[in-house]
Image: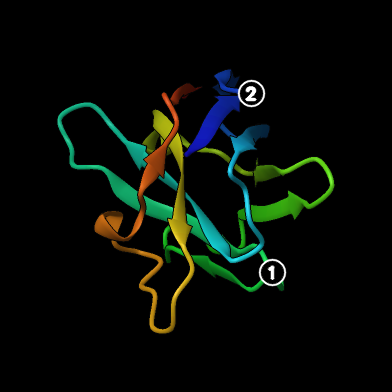
Amino acid sequence: QVQLVESGGGLVQAGGSLRLSCAASGRTFSNYAYGWFRQAPGKEREFVAGIRWSDGITHYADSVKGRFTISRDNPKNTMFLQMNSLNPEDTAVYYCAAAIMRYGLMFTLQREYTYWGQGTQVTVSS
């Protein structure tokens, strides 16, 4: 079992920044991949960014490329999402998730991820 706890959400004005954290505990292994997803009101949950824990290889949704950065702190088993140049369309509940790494893993697919956090609200005002 892997437990994931997100933090760092809040209210920010358009153009501002937030840094989300996801602390992992339990059976954490270097052969996991981690991802950030978000769900806006009335919309389906969508992929935001992912990272392969072992070597730090990253993936991003087109909508956040150049604005968001995913990273990890290995000794602390913590993943981060630095979000810059936020706009109201980024308003959503943000979830972190963990997937057992395998060849051909599709970072963008929710079904690849076994463990999920409870989510943290990000609200961007115009």
Residue type at tag 1: Ser
Q: Is residue 56 above or below residue 84?
A: below
Q: Is residue 23 above or below residue 81?
A: above
Q: Residue at x 55, y 60 (%)?
A: 32
Residue 23 in view, yes or no: yes
Compared across the picture, whether 113 is left or right of 6 comes to left
**Closer-to-camera residue (15/93):** 93
Q: Quadrant of residue 67?
A: bottom right
Mark closest to the chain's N terminus, 2 or 1 = 2
Q: Which mark is on residue 29? A: none
Q: Residue extending furthest bottom?
A: 103
Residue 7 locus on image (x, y percent): 61, 23
* Residue receiving disc 2: 8
Residue 44 locus on image (x, y percent): 18, 42
Compared across the picture, whether 98 is left or right of 89 comes to right
Q: Residue at x 62, y 48 (%)?
A: 28
**Closer-to-camera residue (16/26):** 26
Q: Residue at x 28, y 32 (%)?
A: 40
* Residue receiving disc 1: 54
Compared across the picture, whether 42 is left or right of 39 comes to left
Mark 2: secondary structure: loop
Q: Residue at x 30, y 49 (%)?
A: 46
Colour scheme in use: rainbow
- Contact (CB < 8 A) between labels 2 and 1? no
Residue type at tag 2: Gly
Instruction: State the separation of the CA atoms marked 2 and 1.
Output: 24 Å
